[in-house]
Image (cartoon, rainbow, N blue to C red):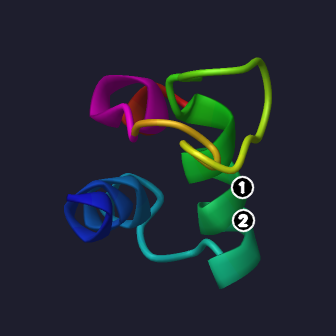
Amino acid sequence: MVAGVAALVAGKHGGALRPQQLKGILKRSADDLGDPGVDPMFSHGRVNAAAAVAH
């Protein structure tokens, strides 16, 4: 699922994003689950395709 969302984001930006930029967008747009912030159970949370593409 994350790979598909990453492809959507990369396509929106015409493939011009560096891998770290793409990773940052995915992390910032994820839905936070569990304890606030990064946690051992859910890491950065659930990928949110709409938020990632809107970024």
In this view, the mark in front (1 or 2)? 1
Magenta stretch in the rendered image: 47-52
Looking at the image, residue 46 lies above or below residue 2 = above
- Whether label 1 touches label 2, CB < 8 Å: yes
Q: Position of residue 28 (x, y in %)?
A: 68, 36
- Residue 9 on the magenta segment: no
Q: Position of residue 22 (x, y in %)?
A: 60, 64
Quadrant of residue 37 in the image?
top right
Name the foreground residue: 15 vs 43.
43
Q: Position of residue 43 (x, y in %)?
A: 63, 49
Q: Quadrant of the N terminus?
A: bottom left
Name the foreground residue: 31 vs 22.
31
Q: Which residue is mark 2?
A: 21
Q: Residue at x 37, y 63 (%)?
A: 6
**Residue at disc 1, secondary structure:** helix
Looking at the image, residue 19 lies above or below residue 50 = below
**Identity, as a three-letter code, of the amino acid under mark 2:** Gln
- Residue 51 on the magenta segment: yes
Residue 18 visible in image: no
Q: Position of residue 25 (x, y in %)?
A: 63, 48
**Residue at disc 2, secondary structure:** helix
| 20 left or right, relative to 54 | right
**Residue furthest to the right:** 37
Q: Which residue is mark 1?
A: 24
| 11 left or right, relative to 15 | left
Helix, strand or loop: magenta stretch:
helix
